[in-house]
């Protein structure tokens, strides 16, 4: 099993990179945020989840430990494969996903293509005892921030830019429109 790679990105595709490690090129699938965090020719250190199936071995890379831990929790649920796990991580950050699971809110999970209410409920049921949400968090805030990220992405901003722009949003701001306006001010600096 491969758990870590250190090398140079020699090819960057839509959802995967090829990392040259000592003359061997490893294909590594990344989250959308992960793809934004690396560039062709860049040296990277990346944590790896090795997914073994009957006919293939696939590598999934993560720059953040929390993201990999959430990915592994998600794919532990029957019906959620690695590709769906990456898609869920593209919709919201790990804290938002934890909050949604802890509050039994399936709306964030059902934003992912291919995940309907039935599978989303299964994810919530199976993972609710495995995640701990912050005490001061509210599910409405998490959903509003997720919707704001979607809105900013539709305006052409990257996931990283959108998440960064809403990171300073006051906790009492729960209206999606207000969050987007606040984020746009941050992006305009």
Image (cartoon, grey):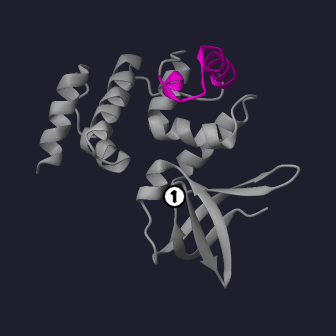
Q: Give the residues drawn in magenta, as a range.
A: 108-128
- Which residue is rendered at x = 54% and y = 46% of the image? 67
Q: In this view, does 129 lie to the left or right of 14?
A: right
- Which residue is rendered at x = 37% and y = 29% of the image? 146
Give the percent coordinates (x, y) of residue 37: 42, 60
The stretch drawn in magenta includes residue 116: yes
Q: Name the residue under label 1.
A: 63
- Which residue is rendered at x = 33% and y = 23% of the image? 144
Q: Is residue 157 left or right of residue 101?
A: left
Q: Residue furthest right?
A: 54
Secondary structure predominantly adopted by residues drawn in magenta: helix
> What is the quadrant of residue 80 in the picture?
top right
Q: Is label 1 in a helix, a strand or a loop?
A: loop
Give the percent coordinates (x, y) of residue 35: 47, 57
Whether residue 57 is visible to the viewer of this picture, yes or no, is: yes
Whether residue 70 is visible to the viewer of this picture, yes or no, is: no
Q: Is residue 173 above or below residue 28?
A: above
Q: Which residue lies furthest to the front in this view?
A: 14
Residue toward you, 83 or 105: 83
> What is the quadrant of residue 140 in the picture?
top left
Give the percent coordinates (x, y) of residue 125: 66, 17
Q: Which residue lies furthest to the bottom in this view?
A: 23
Q: Is residue 82 above or below residue 117?
A: below
Q: In this view, does 171 lie above or below 42?
A: above
Residue toward you, 48 or 56: 56
> What is the quadrant of residue 180 in the picture?
top left
The stretch drawn in magenta includes residue 20: no
Give the percent coordinates (x, y) of residue 120: 61, 20
Number of residues whose C-alpha sits closer than 10 Å to that of mark 1, classed few (under 14), some (14–19) or many (20 or more):
some
Q: In this view, does 11 lie to the left or right of 144?
A: right
Q: In which quarter of the image is the N terminus?
A: bottom right
Q: Is residue 17 above or below residue 97?
A: below
């Amino acid at each position: 099993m491969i758990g870590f790679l250190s090398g140079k990105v020699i090819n960057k595709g839509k959802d995967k990179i090829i990392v040259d490690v000592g003359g061997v090129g490893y294909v590594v699938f990344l989250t959308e945020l992960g793809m934004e965090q690396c560039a062709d020719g860049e040296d990277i250190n990346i944590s790896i989840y090795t997914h073994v199936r009957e006919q293939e071995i696939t590598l999934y890379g993560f720059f953040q430990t929390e993201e990999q831990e959430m990915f592994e929790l998600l794919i532990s649920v029957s019906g959620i494969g690695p590709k769906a796990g990456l898609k869920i991580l593209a919709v919201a950050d790990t804290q938002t996903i934890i909050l949604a699971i802890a509050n039994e809110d399936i709306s964030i999970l059902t934003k992912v293509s291919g995940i309907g209410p039935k599978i989303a409920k299964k994810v919530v049921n199976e993972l609710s005892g495995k995640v701990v949400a912050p005490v001061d968090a509210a599910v409405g805030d998490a959903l509003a921030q997720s919707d704001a990220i979607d809105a900013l992405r539709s305006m052409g901003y990257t996931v990283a830019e959108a998440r960064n722009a809403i990171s300073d949003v006051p906790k009492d701001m729960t209206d999606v429109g207000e969050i987007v306006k606040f984020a746009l001010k941050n992006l305009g600096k």
